Image (cartoon, rainbow, N blue to C red):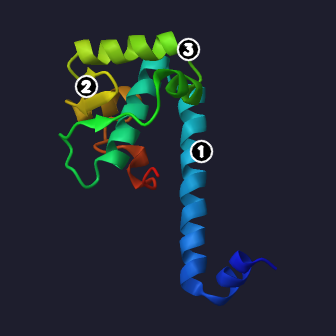
Amino acid sequence: MTEFQRAIKNDPVVAEAAFQSVSSELDLAQHLLFVVGHLEAKARVADFVLSISHRLLRKKGPQSRFKLPMDRRDIANHLGVTTETVSRALSQLQRERLIDVEGKHMRVLDRRALERMARPGDQSTTRSVTESSPPIG
């Protein structure tokens, strides 16, 4: 038995924390499978922006600028699209004044519009599905 397994077995707080972490990761994986399997490219990028902005701005406030933790190639690989598609989608979202992009820095200007785009058919959505996801890092 490893030290980690002993800690889980002997400490209910550690066991609960481990369960919550694994559960969050499974939720994220399930959400990503849905996004890649069901959403068009622009909606995938909108969902990614919402997810990253929420996780990075929990303490700074919703209108703060944040730095993307991945380059466009990595975002494309993550979302199952091409780098050019990510660049086009980000440019479209900026032209539509939903986001403001300067290099790797971004700010969400219209969260609700991004949510509608990322979740077509779900008009009751007022927050990102991934808001409960763990912080990056």
Q: CA distance from mark 2 to mark 1?
A: 26 Å
Tell me the crowding category of disc 3: few under 14, some 14 to 19, or many 20 or more residues within 10 angstroms, Cα based: some
How far apart marks 1 and 3 lie (CA) works out to: 21 Å
Viewer-proximal residue, 51 or 127?
51
Going 47% across and 32% down the picture, which residue do you hit?
70
**Amino acid type assigned to the residue bearing label 2 in the image:** Ile
User: Where 134 sits versus 47, above or below?
Assistant: below
Q: Are marks 1 and 3 in contact (CB under 8 Å)?
A: no
Q: Amino acid at mark 3?
A: Thr
Answer left or right for 46 relative to 26: left
Q: Which residue is mark 2?
A: 99
- Residue placed at 60% from the left, 45% from the top? 29
Please state which of the two labelled residues, at mark 1 or mark 3, is closer to the viewer.
3
Q: Position of residue 81 (x, y in %)?
A: 56, 18
Q: Position of residue 80 (x, y in %)?
A: 59, 23
Q: Give me the C-alpha separation between circle 3 and circle 2.
A: 20 Å
**What's the residue type where badge 1 is placed?**
Gln
Q: Residue at x 28, y 38 (%)?
A: 66
Q: Earlier in the sequence, mark 2 or mark 1?
A: 1
For marks 3 and 2 on the same chain, the one whose residue lies earlier in the sequence:
3
